Image: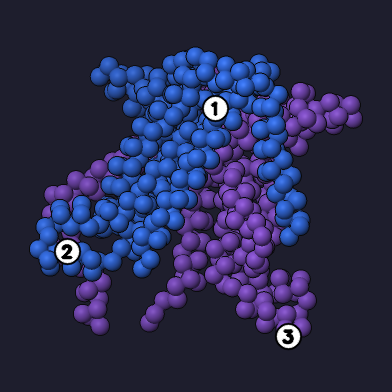
Chain colours: A purple, B blue
Amino acid sequence: MSEQALSHQPRDDVHTEPGAIRFVIVALAVLFLLVFVVLPLVVVFASAFSRGISAYFTALGQPEALAAIKLTLLIAAISVSLNLVFGVIAAWAIAKFDFAGKTFLISLIDLPFSVSPVISGLVFVLLFGAQGFFGPWLQAHDVRILFAVPGIALATIFVTFPFVARALIPLMQEQGTQEEEAAISLGASGLQTFFRVTLPNIKWGLLYGVLLCNARAMGEFGAVSVVSGHIRGETNTMPLLVEILYNEYQFVASFAIASLLAMLALITLLAKTILERRLDERQVPSDH
Amino acid sequence: MGLTLTWLSVIILIPLAGLFLKTFDLSLEQFWGIVTSRRTLNALKISFGLSFAAACVNLVMGMIVVWALVRYKFPGRRLFDAIVDIPFALPTAVAGVALTQLFAQKGWLGAPLAELGIKVAFTPIGIFIAMVFIGIPFVVRTVQPVLQDLDVEIEEAAASLGAGRWHTVFRVILPSLVPALLTGFALAFARAVGEYGSVIFIAGNLPNVSEIAPLLIVIRLSEFRYADATAIAVVMLMASFLIIFAVNRLQRWAQTRMPAQ
């Protein structure tokens, strides 16, 4: 027992470097993370509160800020719920069935991750813009997609599509189809099988995907910036308002909104860390 | 099933197909003219060149961070492990304004750097810094699991055969990390090339000097020069497809090379 514990944690000079080198490497890593990652985060909060707490809350209470917060919540609600449904279906199809073109489908799902957000926005401008493929038709029927909520939602759905499917595919593949087959053979219907067998098995992975999807949906900037048209109080999401206020030198107001988004990021990270630990526990049952 | 495919086509395939169709509005000469115009070429050079430099820094610093996180125990190790993900989680616009504030002439880091005569914000160095920021998690998160899973017995074998520690690290450990390192490098590079939000605030956006390709797309769009925007986008898209293709090949190569894992 104790021998085993020792062999798992070898700490003699064969396995590690001299103390001085260890110190330098840790110091470099910590310094790099502090300067490049932690400091920018601290700057957000320091700038937001640089004129005091009341200035901070005044900035957040502005009608423009409230409108942006509302729009961001609306967009996140639309895109997360749609991606939730279709992400589960896509993951289900890929993990549990074999069909022609499966690899193509997987690369299609990954695509939005590898495309510049600006290009993600651009494709919707080309489709729905005044000179776009559907532009004239939309104008004739008085339907607004671009520079309005539907366009922002579409662009957000596009960039956030991979999160749910990506989180679920490995999990569902690992679990295989045995439990579902057992349920079906015992007389459960397809839907029953899904809600009683599949869903409980994937719930943490699903939550993980939704969490990341939501964070990106609320924080997306490039794609939304291209399709939004920046109409004040109407089509500005929170990240867009951060940009506008910053460019107008309203630093406190800009960083106040930014601090909300930063808090969202921190909460997401915290929840993600907890979920990852849970998922790890499920996959590797600890031996006693 | 059919539903998935339909949804994917509506949301992803049709818009992208539209992008390529749009380029067919242009003749080959027009396309070539746009892509090789001085401003476009410079924007592409800035985007790809600085992304490459930033990915190189990420490769080295990412390796150091991974080594510290996996191999050593130090106070706050778990916290620093979680911190690595901040660039993933922080909305790009927030990162952009924060980095600009930090490196501006009167910023916490900008002021001391200015005294040394180094101007970061509103110069290409600023673009480079922002790209390093967003790229670091890619290298760390691809290399970390591989180093964690690496068998200590190999090191023991190397040591018992008389290899010194340096020899073991550089001849035994590093080579088995190469595929993961290259994958992380490619992912960081691809992300930096397409990055918009965290770069444009700190960039200065001077045409031919500090104007990145994604910004040029946005500028062309706002001028209603859709064809120009599309041509630049197609070039960038092809480049990122190539990178993703390379990453997939790399991973397959790594898998066949190390079947034990």
Q: Chain of mark 1?
A: B
* Residue at image location 78% in from the left, 30% down from the top: A133
**Can you identify the residue that label 3 sits on?**
A186
Q: Which mark is residue B82?
A: none
Discs 3 and 1 share one subunit: no
**In the current view of this chain or complex, which residue is farthest to the right?**
A141
User: Where is residue A170 shown, x and y percent of the image?
Assistant: 54, 63
| Any part of residue A45 in sight | no
Place residue B176 in its image quadrant. bottom left
Closer to the camera in the image, A4 or B103: A4
* Residue at image location 57% in from the left, 16% down from the top: B33
10 Å crowding of disc 1: few (<14), some (14-19), many (20+): many
Instruction: State if disc 3 and disc 2 touch (CB < 8 Å).
Output: no
> Left or right of B113: which side holds B242?
right
Closer to the camera in the image, A7 or A108: A108
Position of the C terminus of chain B, as image quadrant, is bottom left
Q: Chain of mark 3?
A: A
Up the image or down, B70 lies above or below A28; here it is below
Discs 1 and 2 share one subunit: yes
Q: CA distance from mark 1 to mark 2?
A: 48 Å
**Can you identify the residue that label 2 sits on?**
B158
Q: CA distance from mark 2 to mark 3?
A: 55 Å
> Left or right of A59: which side holds B6?
right
Place residue B105 in its image quadrant. top left
**Can you identify the residue that label 1 sits on?**
B214
Mark 2: amino acid: Ala
